[in-house]
Image (cartoon, rainbow, N blue to C red):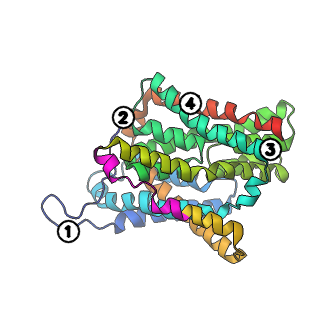
Amino acid sequence: MSTALVARPSATTATGQPRPSVLPGLALSSALGLTAWLTHALVPGVPTTLVAVVLGAALAGSGALEGARDTATAPGLHVASRRVLRVGVALLGLQLALTQVLALGWPVLAVVLLVVTGGIAGTLALGRLLGLRGELLVLVAAGFSICGAAAVAAVAGVRRSRDADAAAAVSLVVLCGSVVMVALPGVALLAGLDPVQVGAWAGASTHEVGQVVVAGGLAGGGTALSVAVLVKLGRVLLLAPVVAVLGWQARRGGGEQGDRAPLVPGFVVAFVLLAVARTWLPLPDLLLTVAGGVQDLALAVAMAALGCALRPRVLGAVGGRGLALAAASTLLVVLLGAPVVLVL
C-alpha cells in the first residue's frame, strides 16, 4: 500500500550531480498554501488545511505534475511536507493554555484520554481485522484520534513514513472529518442535547481543529464553540507523548525506519516548550496573533505539498479496505467521545 510519489532530496543524483533545487517545489506549495490561507481569511468557515489539500490534490489530479515537472518540484514538496510542517506543529503549542484545558475538569479530561488512547488502539485493531498493515494504518490511527492532518504529518516525520501514505491519510482525515463536522452537531441537536454538550462532543470526536471550529459554530457558537475548541485542544495536548511513543516504537523496530527515527524530535520539544510558555509567561497578544498566522500558513503550505502527492493511483491504493478502516475509525472516535455529554 506504500508508494513513494514525492521523492526525497539527496545530496547528489545517481550520476554525482549536485542536489536538485528545492525552490520550485517550495514556491509551488507556498503559492497553494497562501491561496488557502487567504481563502480562509475571506471565508472563516472554510478550514485552511481543507482548501490546501484540495488545491494540491486538484493540481496533482490534473496531470500538471507529471514527467519533468514532477522531477523538478519533488525535492521542494518533500521539504514543505516535512520541515515546514514541523514549524506549524511546533507553533501549535502557543494555542495551548494548559490551565484552560485543565479547567475542563478531570471527568472531561478522562474522556479526552479515552478518545486518544482508545481511538489509536481500536483503529490499529480494526486495521488488523481488515488485513491492513504498514504506515497508513498508524497514520490514520493517530490522525483520527488526535488532531487530524497535523498529527498525521507529525507522526509521519518521526517514523519516516512515505509521503504517499501521509497524503492518503490526510485525504481520509479531510473526507471523514468533514462528514463528522456537519453531521454530528445536527444529529445531536435533534436528539435534544444542549449546545454546550454538542460542542464538547464535537471537540472530542472531530478530526481537525478547523473542523471543530465549524462544528462548534453549527452547535450554536459562543460557549458551545469555546468548549468545543478547549476539548479539542485537550486532545492536541496528547500529541507530544503519542509522537514520542511512536518514535520509540519505530526505533525499537529496527531497520532503516527505526534506525533513523529520533526518539523525541525537536519540533515536539518545541511544541511542549511553547505550550508551557503560553501558559505561564505574559506573552503579548501581538506575538500570539503573529505566531498564529505563521502557524496557519506553515500548515497550509505543508498540507498543499501533501495534497500534491495525492495522485489517482495513491487514492486507488487505499482501496475499499482503507475506506472501511477510515469509516470504522471515525465511528469509533465519535462513540468514544460521546460520554463527554454525561460529565459536563
Q: Which residues are magenta?
A: 255-270
Mark earlier in primary sequence (3, 4): 4
Q: CA distance from mark 2 to mark 4?
A: 21 Å
Identify which residue, 67 or 279, lies in the foreground.
279
Q: CA distance from mark 3 to mark 1?
A: 55 Å
Amino acid type of the residue that numbered disc 1 sits on in the rendered structure: Pro
Quadrant of the rendered image containing residue 99: bottom right
Relative to residue 18, is residue 269 drawn left or right?
A: right
Mark earlier in primary sequence (2, 1): 2
Q: CA distance from mark 2 to mark 1?
A: 32 Å
Q: Which mark is residue 18?
A: 1
Identify which residue, 145 or 107, lies in the foreground.
107
Residue 161, compared with residue 20, is above or below; it is above
State the SS at label 2. loop
Q: Which mark is residue 219?
A: 3
Majority SS type along the magenta span: helix
* Residue 143: x %, y % from top left: 54, 44
10 Å crowding of disc 4: few (<14), some (14-19), many (20+): some
Amino acid type of the residue that numbered disc 4 sits on in the rendered structure: Gly
Identify which residue, 62 or 249, lies in the foreground.
249
- Residue at 48%, 28% (x, y): give it: 127
Q: Quadrant of the N terminus?
A: top left
Residue 70, compared with residue 316, is above or below; it is below
Which-is-in-front pick, marks 1 and 4?
4
- Residue at 44%, 52% (x, y): give it: 306
- Residue at 85%, 43% (x, y): give it: 195
Q: Which mark is residue 1?
A: 2
10 Å crowding of disc 1: few (<14), some (14-19), many (20+): few
